């Protein structure tokens, strides 16, 4: 199966995740509360975190 191409909307939503204070803290402090929270929320609820993964090829909580 081919990998999905990123769209302009995906890139815009990934940018929101990139500047999100919670996600930024999760990437900065790997042992903190924000990291644990983002790990739980990103796959299930947050559309921005999922777009971040599609665009950058890594999870929103990974540095």
Image: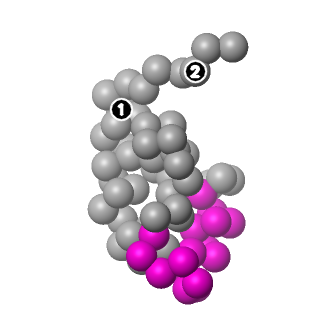
Is residue 59 one of those drawn in magenta? no
- Dividing the picture into quadrants, the one containing residue 31 is bottom right
- Name above or below for residue 54 compared with residue 35: above
Q: Quadrant of the N terminus?
A: top right
**Picture coordinates of residue 25 (x, y %)?**
42, 77
Residue 9 disc label: 1
Please report the residue visible at 50 percent of the width from the left and 57 percent of the height from the top: 60
Give SS at disc 1.
Answer: helix
**Picture coordinates of residue 40 (x, y %)?**
68, 66
Q: Nearer the viewer, mark 1 or mark 2?
A: 2
Residue with the most extreme front position: 63
**Picture coordinates of residue 21 (x, y %)?**
36, 73
Is residue 36 one of those drawn in magenta? yes
Residue in front for this viewpoint, 8 or 56: 56
From the image, give the main secondary structure of the stretch colored magenta: helix
Category of crowding for the residue at label 2, using alpha-carbon neighbours closer than 10 angstroms: few (below 14), some (14–19), many (at least 20): few
Instruction: Please name the residue that numbered disc 2 is placed on.
Output: 3
Category of crowding for the residue at label 1, using alpha-carbon neighbours closer than 10 angstroms: few (below 14), some (14–19), many (at least 20): few
Give SS at disc 2.
Answer: loop
Residue in front for this viewpoint, 62 or 42: 62
Q: Is residue 58 left or right of residue 15?
A: right
Estimate the spatial distance between the alpha carbons at disc 1 and disc 2, rounded to whole Å: 17 Å
Please report the residue visible at 51 percent of the width from the left and 41 percent of the height from the top: 57
Q: Which residues are magenta?
A: 27-42
- Name above or below for residue 47 compared with residue 60: above
Residue 51 at least partly seen: no
Which badge, 1 or 2, comes first in the chain's sequence? 2
Please report the residue visible at 31 percent of the width from the left and 49 percent of the height from the top: 15
Please report the residue visible at 68 percent of the width from the left and 53 percent of the height from the top: 44
Residue in front for this viewpoint, 58 or 41: 58
């Amino acid at each position: 199966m081919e990998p999905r191409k990123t769209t302009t909307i995906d890139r815009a939503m990934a940018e929101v995740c990139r500047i999100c204070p919670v996600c930024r803290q999760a990437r900065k402090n790997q042992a903190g509360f924000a990291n644990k929270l983002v790990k739980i929320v990103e796959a299930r609820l947050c559309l921005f975190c999922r777009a971040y993964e599609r665009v950058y090829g890594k999870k929103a909580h990974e540095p």
